[in-house]
Amino acid sequence: MTLASDTAPDLHNPLDTPGLTWRHSFAALGPDFHTELGPRPLPAPYWVGRNRALARELGLQDAWLESADTLAALTGNQPLPGSRSLASVYSGHQFGVWAGQLGDGRALLLGELHTPIGPQELQLKGAGSTPYSRMGDGRAVLRSSIREFLCSEAMHGLGIATTRALCVTGSDAPVRREEIETAAVVTRTAPSFIRFGHFEHFSYSNQHAQLKTLADYVIAHFYPDCRQARQPYAALLQAVSERTAHLMAAWQAVGFCHGVMNTDNMSILGLTIDYGPFQFLDAFDPGHVCNHSDSQGRYAFNKQPNIAYWNLFCLGQALLPLIENQQDALAALESYKTVFPAAFQARMRAKLGLSDERPEDAALIDATLKLLAANHADYTIFWRRLCAFNTPGGQEPVRDLFLDRAAFDAWALQYSERIAPVDHALQADLMLKSNPKFVLRNHLGEEAIRAAKLKNFSMVDTLLTVLQTPFDEHPEHEDLAGFAPDWAASISISCSS
């Protein structure tokens, strides 16, 4: 990477890659928004996983992710030339309760890179304590870092908006959680890591000038069309509501549970952010709670769309000092109620292979989900097998997923009648592009983590490769597309990371 834009790169320094420059637009907002500090080094770092595909998208040379200097820099042991390390402050509602000031307790923003895919912020997660660590150690552990590294790329492969991860580095430095684990650092990227909680922080503390500065910054950099609106800040709220609606539709369609949908974990850009106790559904259970810390089931799978709206309402309240007219804010939020169901129905029609829309489709989608829930059928395997429904013998593998064969047969008749006039070749193509063969099931992540603890990172590499193209067949990795083993039900995932 280069230094600032007016500094020529050192071609002998592997940390300098010609053609990339830094910008520090978030840092320029001033000290009310962040605290500048450096990362805390970790002893004897080593590579755990490297996302070479993302590196190439960012314009980084292949050799850059092989360098010992890069390893040190992305562990926080030496600065990247031109970077400017800071932790941002925000607040938020956690499990429905106002938590007050929060902030980047273990994440450090290094700056914004100019890349072939547009401006991308670079952040180190797990690089040590900050003023916002709230008695925490500022570290991330190997277990959770591998899960975030793999899942963020899995979501990208699925076509779902997300932050991404460039690499994971590890160290044998001990970190105390429920037990002693080892440290790791995730280098992640996104156009911005600004959350709903950033706006809540300044609104609840009556810092309305800073609130306006932040809103103007977000509009200028990410929602420029809002500047022309009669009420720019209401237009911002509506745009965020619509992006969030599309995100929720994508989560629900693919069977993804986030687990901790606090307002400080909601991206202002509608990205999936902060991978903690997430899970892709195995057996379909609409009320599934993936986070063992969520004793009340607030963030159950089927509650996610309503929780997203609740969080957007909190964002709307935070923006009220700028919007002024409460009715404009409420009208902006209303867009979520129309965009989400339309986007969800569109995704589900694609999964069923329906390229056109008919009034009876909503009932078919509902019947499909009820059938899956009643039989606890494997969600991903059902949809993938369904792609072959119209091929000779293609119905039996789908039927085998259901204990209640009569109920399946009744549904299959309803489905067959709907798809009768459809071009079956086009239908199969649409379904294969809409129903992934591979998702990051909990047991796959657990197997990769267990091996990584023994310094065997081959499973991390294999999963990364498969999850980057989850709709492809990958016949050599058929075992990664199978049913979850019985022991997977005993995997406990919580907020501890």
Image (spheres, grey):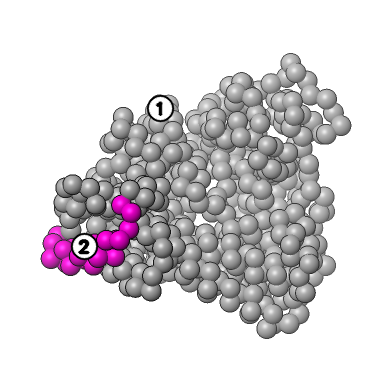
- Three-letter code for the amino acid on which mark 2 is drawn: Ala
Residue to which mark 2 is pinned: 412
Residue under circle 1? Answer: 458
Residue in the picture at 64% in, 24% down: 61
Chief SS of the magenta region = helix
Looking at the image, residue 210 lies above or below residue 483: below
Question: Which quadrant is home to the N terminus?
Answer: top right
Residue under the image location 44 percent in, 33 percent down: 465
Magenta segment boundaries in residue numbering: 403-424
Q: Nearer the viewer, residue 247 or 86?
A: 247
Q: Percent position (x, y) of residue 69?
A: 65, 23
Specify whether 226 is left or right of 463.
Answer: right
Residue 207 visible in rendering: no
Q: Amino acid at mark 1?
A: Ser
Position of 31 relative to 227 (above/below): above
Is the Cβ of the residue at disc 2 closer than 8 Å to that at disc 1? no
